[in-house]
Amino acid sequence: MKILVVGATGTIGKAVVEALHARHEIVTAGRSHGDQRVDLTDPASIRRLFEKVGALDAVVSAAGNVHFGPLLEMTPEQFAVGNSDKLMGQVQLALEAARHLNPGGSVTLVAGTLSRDPIRYGASASLVNAALEGFVRAAALEFPPGRRINVVSPTVLCESLPAYGAYFPGSPGVPAARVALAFVKSVEGAQTGQVYVVEA
């Protein structure tokens, strides 16, 4: 399969590429690194990406930014970081991908544990992740026949604990390589409209 991986240089993205590259042709994309450049906050940039890479068998997103901070101090601009990047960026990526997928193709997005297990300072991430999970369930009903869409929703990564572990008390984290297996299941499997939860 020809697979586009957006966010391929991040911790999850690298693990996904590692899990898939031996069996598939991988095209990487990111804001500043990869085979192609894309800005998820810019729909025109997303369209140009698909014009360049052509038809695909799968699109994987392991990208998206959100703002973390005290809820009552969060500004509309700070909320907009997650809304325009991780949420609507991935929504637009999925919609554009649907127009370029070969029969049997799939889209896999990334959400996260804060949709179901919130933390202090993570209200924006909880909002975005929950919205992505709801979007995928609904989008599966209207995706083109024979095309699939799923989302992977992992807890905090082991690799991220040194930087973010204090925000996730009691969580041992999960290795990025284990999270990557959920992306493999989505890409190489047959399910659609699924939220693949990856917990410790």
Image (cartoon, rainbow, N blue to C red):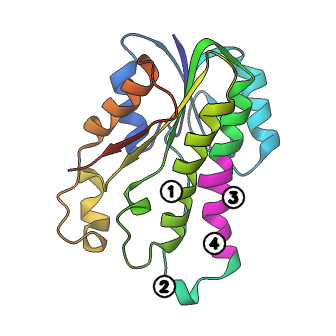
Compared across the picture, whether 135 is left or right of 109 comes to: right
- Name the secondary structure under disc 4: helix
- Mark nearer the N terminus (2 vs 1): 2
Kindly identify which residue carries mark 1.
129
Amino acid of disc 2: Pro
Amino acid of disc 3: Ser
Kindly identify which residue carries mark 2.
70
Is residue 195 on the magenta stretch?
no
Q: Residue at x 39, y 20 (%)?
A: 20
Q: Residue at x 45, y 72 (%)?
A: 122
Kindly identify which residue carries mark 3.
84
Compared across the picture, whether 196 is left or right of 151 comes to: left
* Residue at the far right in the pictured view: 44
Specify whether residue 59 is in view: no
Specify whether residue 140 is in view: yes
- Name the secondary structure under disc 2: loop
Q: Position of residue 159 (x, y in %)?
A: 26, 51
Q: Position of residue 137 (x, y in %)?
A: 55, 41
